[in-house]
Amino acid sequence: MKKNISYILILWGLTIATASAQGIMGGHVTGNVQIDGQMSHADSVIGATDVPQRLLMNARADILYTNGDFSAGLRFEAYQDPLLGFDAEYKGQGLANYFVKYNGSKLTLTAGNFYEQFGNGLILRTYEDRYLGLDNSLLGVNVQYRPVDGVTLKALAGKQRYYWSYGDGLVRGVDGEVNLNSILKPMTDSKLRVTLGAGFVSKYEEDGNLTADDPSQLLNLPLNVGAGAVRGDICYGHWSLNAEYAMKGQDPSALNNYTYRTGNAAVVNLNYSQRGFSAGLQAKRVENMGFKSMRSQTGEMLYINYLPAITKNHTYAFLAMYPYATQVMGEQGLQADVMYKIKKGTLLGGKYGTDLHFNSSVVVGLDTTVTGGKGTDGYTVNPGLGPLYYGDASAEVAKKLSKSVKLTATYAYQVFNPVVENESGDLHHNNILIADLSWKVNKKHSLRFEAEWLGSDSYYNKAEEEHTDRRAGDWIMGLVEWNIGRNFFVSLSDQYAYQDGIGNYYNLSVGYTQGATRLQVGYGKQREGMLCIGGVCRLVPASNGLTFSLTTSF
Amino acid sequence: MKKLFFALMGLLMAGNLMAQNAKLPDNITLKDLEGQTVQSSVIQNNGKPIILSFWATWCKPCNRELDAIREVYDEWQEETGVKLVAISIDDARSAARVRPWVDGHDWAYEVYMDQNKDFARAMNVGADVPHTFIINGEGEIVWQHKGYQDGGEEELIEKVRELLNK
């Protein structure tokens, strides 16, 4: 990829030159830039190590040229060297993403790197998350055709980004979606809104990259692996239902220990909502659904599909301390969510109203029996439930106490199985309390206070250096954030393990925002932990020192 | 090689400075809250300004901002005719919760879903939300802001007022 920079730049330049030669020059160049830096020195208590380079830096710039229906973009990335927790494979710099795109009213055509999603993504979703260091964009061609209102057809082919190169497998896919209300006259004004869709994805990969130590162990690997999905979206008044079912053919890979049983996944979302009240129920089951464009790959790169966690995405520090990550080999779960706004002027609502939010989720494994190793079907599934992986329940009350003070209080209970992070040990049971108070002091200043407590039955075992989980024990946390005017903020926080645990993590951050430019500088200690976004996690090692981040859009 | 890159960038940016404000892209595919596909050209306000806010259900500052505007939205609309269009970048994990979320929070905004982030990319919204834009009556992007601090909504309405007084 790096070698191709000059070639691509010239091509890109020529494209724009052509555009201008045709007298349509004008258009706009926009973009965004992000630079993150980090310095860290050793701290044996929290497990931070020295950074020999002193300064680590991730930087990227997206430049987009748009002229009417035509656009061209490129992204330059530099990792000198990558921040702690990012794969060392990222080391280096170069053009990581480039494309030209025609975006008409009926036709969208992209050549180059693109991001696409079929339905909920159970069989295909290419996306990028810069904080996880994840980019599985496809390099190839993507066509979207909308012949009439309510009909969308997609076709694509390409190879997936793998750090600074591309995966071996060729990914091809087609997808169609029809909105019945748009194409069926009698349904035009119906309260019943129905959208149906179906997709198919095929991966082709030569079998040359599987090296077998023992020739008798050579497997007859399928060169083409297919996956298909059907889905529906139905709305009726206050009700909505979204469901998708996906199947994947025989796909022996490193993820499933080269076994031949087919995979499947199902998601159902049922919601009821009206102004001031909503309730939702989500169910999900996944079996052997890790679908990668390179069969030898484990880890988070080269996934063709997306299997998000069914649990709520918690954002408070202690609620996110034991995050759940999707188990692609098998899991089944439920999530329920209820929101209610007590009207203002009522006894409980007070002068400004009160917001209530309840959430609960539970995820268990599949009950399986192992029937063989490599080259066999591998296992069978028994009816019933496997081990408990994760469960939580939370209640949140948000209330404006006066014109300038707002309080949010949260209680949560969690059960966490270490097997989710490939560790062994007993279930952890956690109780969590959070108070979040914001106070608008005057037109220029506002303050925010956060107090959190986590009580856990896990404990830190110094004797077993290998299995010491630095999250263990009971924690308290305090945070003060001072917003000065509209541009500045200063925040000071401390997380402290006061019983059965270890560590004291303080942090001071200062930030400045001007329009779409934001600079943030922090100093302090960062706990080793899982950073999870959408059920995909990255282990972030402990660090101790300075961090900074600069982002801008133009 | 590097020189060529920066020279090219410089040239293009200089061209850009002379040009007018970028327009809101109109052929990006979004979904409304009933699951129906729409093009971004549906984002209209009869020649009056639009506040375009990229947000997500899991983003606390986004929710604080949209809740704060909820309290004053009627007054804003009466005074300036402004419309707030909220673009959710929730992915498959929480996308089904967006409609209940909007109802549960009692938000009277026009909301669209941008699960694949096509719109966010076209608008150069980086990794972080909230990211808020002001669009003038001609559909041009005239102002943008990252993040939200308590009271930040007042800056938004001031920018809208400035636009109307021009």
Image (cartoon, coloured by chain):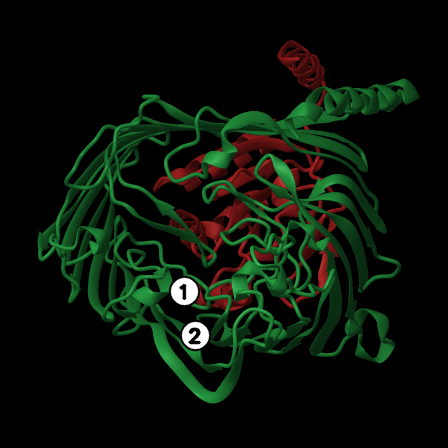
Tag 2: amino acid: Gln
Dot 2 crowding, Cα within 10 Å, few <14, some 14–19, many 20+: many
Please provide percent x and percent y for residue A365: 42, 76
Q: Does residue A298 appear to the left or right of A99 in the view shown?
A: left
Residue A204 is left or right of residue A444, and the answer is right
Name the residue at 72% across, 64% down.
Answer: A222
Q: Is residue A94 left or right of residue A536?
A: right
Shown in green, the chain is A
Q: Quadrant of residue A416?
A: bottom left
Depth check, front residue: B72 or A282: A282
Residue at 84% x, 57% y is: A146
Instruction: Tell me which label, 2 or 1, sits earlier in the chain.
Output: 1
Q: Which chain is red?
A: B
Residue A13 position in % (x across, y down): 78, 20
Marks 2/1: CA–CA distance: 8 Å
Q: Which mark is residue A312?
A: 1
User: On the picture, is B37 further left or further right than B105?
Assistant: right
Q: Position of residue A205 (x, y in %)?
A: 72, 54
Asked if the residue under mark 1 is in contact with the one under mark 2, i.e. CB atoms within 8 Å, the reply is yes
Q: Is residue A512 above or below residue A316?
A: above
Label 2 element class: strand
Tell me: residue A236, above or below residue A64. below
Q: Quadrant of the N terminus of chain A?
A: top right
Which residue is located at x 64 percent, y 66 percent?
A: A251
Tell me the element at label 1: loop
Residue reaching furthest to the left: A499
Please tell me if label 2 and label 1 are on a single chain: yes
The image shows residue A443 at horizontal and vertical percentages of 30, 35
The disc placed on residue A335 is 2
